[in-house]
Amino acid sequence: MLEVRDLEVAYGDLQVVWGVSFDVPERSIVAVIGPNGAGKTTTLRAIMSLLPVRGGTVSFRGKPISGLLTHQIVEQGLVMIPEERATFAGMTVGQNLELGAYAKRARPHRDETMDEVLAIFPRLAERRKQLAGTLSGGERQMLAIGKALMARPELLILDEPSLGLAPVVVEATFETIRSIRERGVSVLMVEQHVEMTLEVVDHAYILETGRVVGDGSSDELRHDRRILDAYLSM
Amino acid sequence: MSKARFGALVAAVSLLVAGTVPVAAQDAEIPESIKVGAVVPLTGPFAGGGAQVERGYRYAIDAINEAGGVYVEEYGTSLPLELDLRDDESDPNRTTAILEDLNGEGVVAYLGGFGSPLHAAGTVIAEKNQIPYMGVATALQALHENGYRYYFSPFPKSPDIAVSVFEMLNALLPEGERPTRVGIFQESTDWGEELGAAWTEQAPNYGYEVVFHEKYTPGTTDFSDLIFKAQEAGVQALLSLPTPPDGFALFKQMGELGWKPEFSLVVRAADVPTWNDLGDVGDGVFLSAGWHPALGFEGIEPMNQRHIDEQGRPADPVVGGSYSLVQILADSIERAGTLDREAIRDAMAATDLDTVAGHITFREDGTSPIENPLMQRQDGAVQLIWPAEAATAEIRYPANE
Amino acid sequence: MRRNVSVAAWFVLLAVCIVLPFSSEDSQVLTIAIQTFILTALASSWNIIGGFAGQISLGHAAFFGMGTIITRELWLSGAPLPLSLAAAIVATALFALIIGVPMLRFRGIYFSIGTLALAVAISLTIGNLFPGITSMPVEALRAYTFTDPYFLALGAAVTTVAVAMLLRRSVVGLGMMAVRDDEAAAGAVGVDVLAHKLAAFAISAALAALAGGAFAFFSVSYYPSYPFTAVWSFETILVTFVGGIGTIVGPIAGSAFFVIGRDTIAANFEGFQVIGFGVLFIVVVLLVPGGMVEGAQRIGAWVVKQGQGRKRDVEG
Amino acid sequence: MQLVIQSAISGLLIGGMYGLIALGLALAFGVLKVLNVAHGELVMLGGYVTFFLVAVVGLDPFLSMPLVFVATFGVGVLLYLVLFRFVVRFDIDTRIKNSLLISFGLVLILQALAVTFFTADERAIITDYSTAALTFESIRVPFIRLAGLLVAVALSVGLQQLLDRTTFGHAIKATSEDWALASLAGIDIRRVYLVAFAISAGLAGVAGTLIALGFSVSPSIGLGWTLKALIVVVLAGLGSIRGLIVAGMLLGLAEGLASVWLGGAYREIVALGAFLLVLLVRPQGLFGRRE
């Protein structure tokens, strides 16, 4: 579904991502794990062309998307939830969700999708008129995911969903991700928590200082600690 | 410092040095023309008046050159006048810069533009370079009180304006009907202060009382407080000298706030034809532009006719004054018999000439005894009201009928 | 080798400037030169607060104006010129310190708009208090020559550039540039941010006053509120950016280019000179933020690259 | 006492004008983070378009407003595509600084163009209702000024409704809050920037009509009005649309009262002084949130 080949990304003349390649097959959950500053977020932002791609290609469902603008990529069905501030604090929950369906592909089915999302996250229905800025961390994460689902994505990218959340909330979030995959949406996740991630994902790539240093299915990685320990100075 | 930076430095120096193009040496034998330098506001707030000054100069030079030019004894022949006229954008600092350039071009005399600030700047340069400078459309008396030898202005000054207003009102209006309660809107400029003081000083001598007198900064957009105070003080005669665009804003707001005094004098701002844009809000206003075609002086007719043909209306107030300056200059050169600036200055000081602006002689300080005509805008046309004997229309008083 | 090439270049430039008034009597040339020196002094002084310390002040004309009016009033009322000049510089620097404390608490756009509002308020006040034109007495007019004002203006330019050079290499200067690059980081490292901003503000104000004094001595007649008008602030910023903000050569090259360009272009076709500078200014800010200095460096590097390319072909 | 009331009313009415001009400026700054110092020149252009429509085409000024809006909207589109499109590529801080400088260059260009096309004479529009006014005892409220205030309030409320009620309005609010997140929601932020800037220019045009009616138009009036709008924008708190008309009216009120008590010459100076004081006490403006 999503093929990333020899991706090179740089901030000005400071190169951060060196020849990263990985795939996210249909209906699968893939993770990219690595320590802080490994270039995870930069890779994601480059895929969504929020950052210019210095080299390599990114293609989605067989078509190259590295030349497209962000909103055009979203139009293709590839949606990303950024690391922090993933909701519009100054707007109400309802408005955030409506904006999620702004893309042409999603706007016609907005009400229908809204009901589905509110079914998944009943708490959001209660808070509908509230400003997103007044929600708790967990609620805001729900809203972020709900907003992304409003765009009826075929592939959902999450940038460190567990960041700054209480363990119980992280558990619920990962549960939600599993249920999203059940509904036919592939997921690409970037995370630091190795154990929890491996329980949910099918396949994982290990990223260190901007390079993919290894990958494997979640079972291989979980059983064979050596691969993990060798690559990650965890 | 890197090599390239040194390159930038050399570039800067070469630009500086390249500027020193040596000026062409003074051409030998008989010059083809008499070079006259003129600096006039063709853009900026004074552009309306500047256009009239430029037209006056052009008409006069065409007339003189058609009549064979100016006889210069030194060369035993007549030479045409050549006008080097530049736009100072109504900015006194451009005026000084241009006059310095014109000095470099070897002009025999300076002709000024429109408005006291520009003349104030110009006369100083004329004094420094010792070149005779003539200007109209400036009533600033102060310019004649600093001992300058090279400034001549055959144009009514603040004292003349102050006196003529009250003389006209007393002559044309019976005792009981005069607008004795006077209000002064004084622009805080040097001329504003001078004319404001002259009005205040003269008013009591003619039985008028200044009941309101306040300053405002040029460029003010909201005059409502001034208008209310004047209304409250019961002002019947408004005396003002706004720099363009203030005149427009002032009268528009007087219209909006429903105040139209019996008599209003707007010096300078009302001289421009676009004043008629104000419609009846601006109608009936008096202006003191120093000249009017109906004054009937010798030589007005052909110039007025050309103005009607080209502009479709009789000669504008400032055209006459500027036309007369060229006549005085030509006469001075002829009497001096040479193109030497000092000789022309001395001849100019001894001027005794009939011009389109009347009979001109100059006092020691460069002013000339000239009566200040007053005009009134009636239905868009500029009618001469004072001096009474040359009047083209009855005074329309009170204006707020 | 590079060190003395640049030192030599400065002395060559200085020598040319000193010789100029004797080699050519043409008043037009001397006027352009004096205007360039005054604008250079003004731009270099603004460069200290705008280029080194990174605080975009839109009110530099206020300090320039104060320099002119204090010098002019004292000098015309009989005080010796050096004394009037010194008084103007000290008074302006003090004023900058006093208003600097509140103004420099503002950051970014608030500081720019605050300084603009302050400068306009001062300009209007001066317009009200000093409506009349100020011109030299008749005797001074007769005896007026360009040489004295020329050297005062040159002195102002040289002093300002020298102070800028010393400042740039000094610890204080480094502190200012740290504040410019990242105020928070500078503060964290122990740089007293407010003190450095204030120093930059006061020094640039004092030097602007010096430029003002040179203007007062050079100008035969002008309206006292004119040096306070916003056009001076805008021209100063325009010239510093076009020349190269934050550099020593920038304000000099920019001033020369602007004054000479304005004079030559204005002479033959009116409005386009303004449009030309407007477009040039936009191109510089968008494409060549480093101005003429960066442009020269790019061209220099390109030439060097071409040179090597040809050399290599020859050898290759 | 009459005088104080009358001056206060006049101040409030003119303040509405300051607020209207600030509306366009704040929209451009709030959404694109671009400070357009040439906003006053767009007001001037609006004035000249109005003058043309009234004097040549013979339209009534208030009826010409929609056309003037469309004309200056078009100019806004042009300016965005030619110029500001490149400015929005910078990060936020450089964007503000560069837009300040670039729009200053634009001021020079637009003024010079205005002089070449419209000459430097100042123009004014007079209608038969120019001198009409509502009067209570001796207090007069000129019709044109009142209508100007109503137009300003209407446009401000209209803009607020657009932002609060319509989807595109939400897209604009989202973009102004976080352009990256907005594009991740599928919003084409280029179009949002284009339309927002064009609306800002349109609002300036309409303000130009009111100025041509109430005052006069000449190539050099731009900067004066821009400074007033800048003050109002900062007073209301950078980027906030809500308090602009009120902040404008407060500035007008301060000027009116200053001229009553201290005399006409000090109205501007007192207003600027008051502005600096407010800035010192509440740097985030009267209505703005503490950043």
Image (spheres, helix red, strand yellow):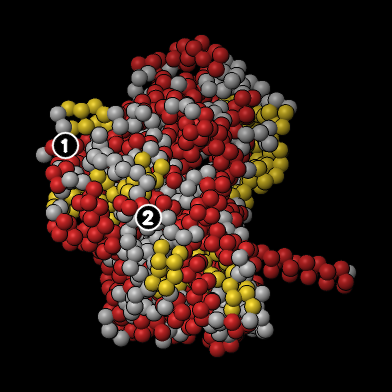
Both labels 2 and 1 in a single chain: no
In the image, taking residue A145 as reference, residue B25 lies left or right, namely right
Callout 2–callout 1 Cβ contact below 8 Å? no
Q: Position of residue B3 (x, y in %)?
A: 65, 75
Element at label 2: loop
Side of B228 where A142 appears, left or right? right
Q: Amino acid at mark 1?
A: Ile
Q: Is residue C79 left or right of residue C226?
A: left
How would you rate the neighbour count of disc 1 (Cα within 10 Å): few for under 14, some for 14-19, many for 20 or more?
Answer: few
The correct choice, above or below, for B30 with respect to B195 in the image is below
User: Residue drawn 24% across and 48% down?
Assistant: B172
Q: Which mark is residue D5?
A: 1
* Chain ID, mark 1: D
Mark sitting on residue A234: none
Q: At numbered mark 1, what does the secondary structure look like: helix, strand or loop? A: helix
Q: Is residue A224 visible?
A: no
**Mark 2 → mark 1, Cα distance in angstroms:** 38 Å
Q: Amino acid at mark 2?
A: Ala
Q: Residues within 10 Å of mark 2 (few under 14, many from 20)?
A: many
Q: Quadrant of the C terminus of chain C?
A: bottom right
Residue B260, image x and y in percent?
A: 25, 39
Could you say which disc has been placed on residue B289 in the image?
2
Specify the quadrant that holds the N terminus of chain C. bottom right
- In the rendered image, residue B265, in percent from the top left (x then y), is placed at 29, 49
